[in-house]
Image (cartoon, rainbow, N blue to C red):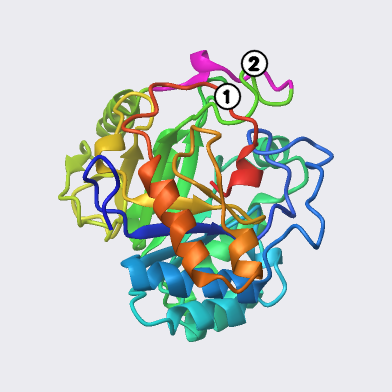
Amino acid sequence: MKDSHGRTIDYLRISLTDRCNLRCIYCMPEDGVCSMSHEEILTLEEIEAIVRVAAELGFKHIRLTGGEPLVRKGVVDCVREIVNTPGIERVAMTTNGTLLPRMAKDLKEAGLSRVNISLDTLDPDQFRFITRRGELADTLVGIDAALEAGLNPVKVNAVVVRSLNQDLLAFAKLSLDRPLHVRFIEYMPVGESSGVDGCGWGPDDVIDSDDVVRIVSEQAEAEGLGPLIPQNEQAAEGWGPARYFAFEGAQGTVGVISPMSRHFCSECNRLRLTADGKLRPCLFSDLEYDVRTPVRAGDMEGVKAAIFEALGHKPEDHFDIVGTDRKMSQIGG
């Protein structure tokens, strides 16, 4: 599958739900977003039908997101069905990790191959501030459960925000003794353009990923660890645009994702499917194409047409657009 700019598109990110058991300040308001009705949300059978069509067209990689995908009833069976779809090579998930202790083994047995766990701080008090209701220990136990279940790779995604003053070296050191792949992600102004729900975040909170690498390397050298060493792009079996580094002798890696300072739009390989059945060609754009109507009508040619329409309108670049109508939890990350 090629878009109108010649990029190969083989990766579909699917939001299973807009609901979440946390309320992270960059993702949704404290009281949550106005949840979609049962009738608005795609059924798991509809999602599976869309995946079958996408696979026929050449999509190979599926990532399940939310909200929090593990709050969706039937998620393990959904993973199993998608894994068994001809043409699909890998199925991954992005989660906050809190429900992994009781679900990681079942997900692995269903065929989930990899997991990204969102974690923005290693300070318990700051974790409660960011998530508004979570406990750091729950996510840390979730990371352990993912490793114990044999999910590989296990990645830890941290959004870097200047005003939070996160301990970046502490994150990076998670990669030393276990095969964890820590990725620092530049803050992306998705959602309201004047800061997210009054928490005051804005362009000044973006830290260039090159600065992140420099800060971590300088602090690590001061502790005698040595600097981060560039790795090849396959260091963590990535599907996306991360650049990877590692400490000498470390079991895992440290990556950076730079949507603001280094646009990787020329390498973009994905479409996004929202929980209510809209295809989004770009995270930073409010352009959406309806796939729910044709799939509910049993019109698989209509599903294909919606995918082709979304591909045809995939922008060449996001051009630093600030603010979108939907918040991150409503898009699917």
Per the image, the residue denoted by label 2 is 194
Q: In the rendered image of this protein, does residue 147 appear above or below residue 239?
A: below
Indicate whether residue 43 is drawn in magenta.
no
Q: CA distance from mark 2 to mark 1?
A: 8 Å
Q: Residue sitting at 25 percent across and 37 percent down? A: 266
Numbered badge on residue 323: 1
* Residue 98 picture location, percent across and down: 65, 61
Q: Residue at x 42, y 37 (%)?
A: 185
Task: Give the vertical position of 176 relative to 256 (above or below).
Answer: below
What's the amino acid at mark 2?
A: Ser
Quadrant where the N terminus is found in the figure: bottom left
The percent coordinates of residue 49 (x first, y second) are 54, 74
Q: Mark 2 or 1, which is nearer the eye?
A: 1
Q: Magenta stretch: give its range.
A: 198-207
Is residue 152 visible to the viewer in this orientation of the structure? no
**Local secondary structure at mark 1:** loop
Residue 32 lies, in percent from the top left, at 79, 42
Disc 2 to disc 1: CB gap under 8 Å:
yes
User: Left or right: where does residue 32 sit relative to residue 6?
Assistant: right
**Dominant SS type (magenta):** loop
What residue occupies the far top of the structure in this picture? Answer: 204
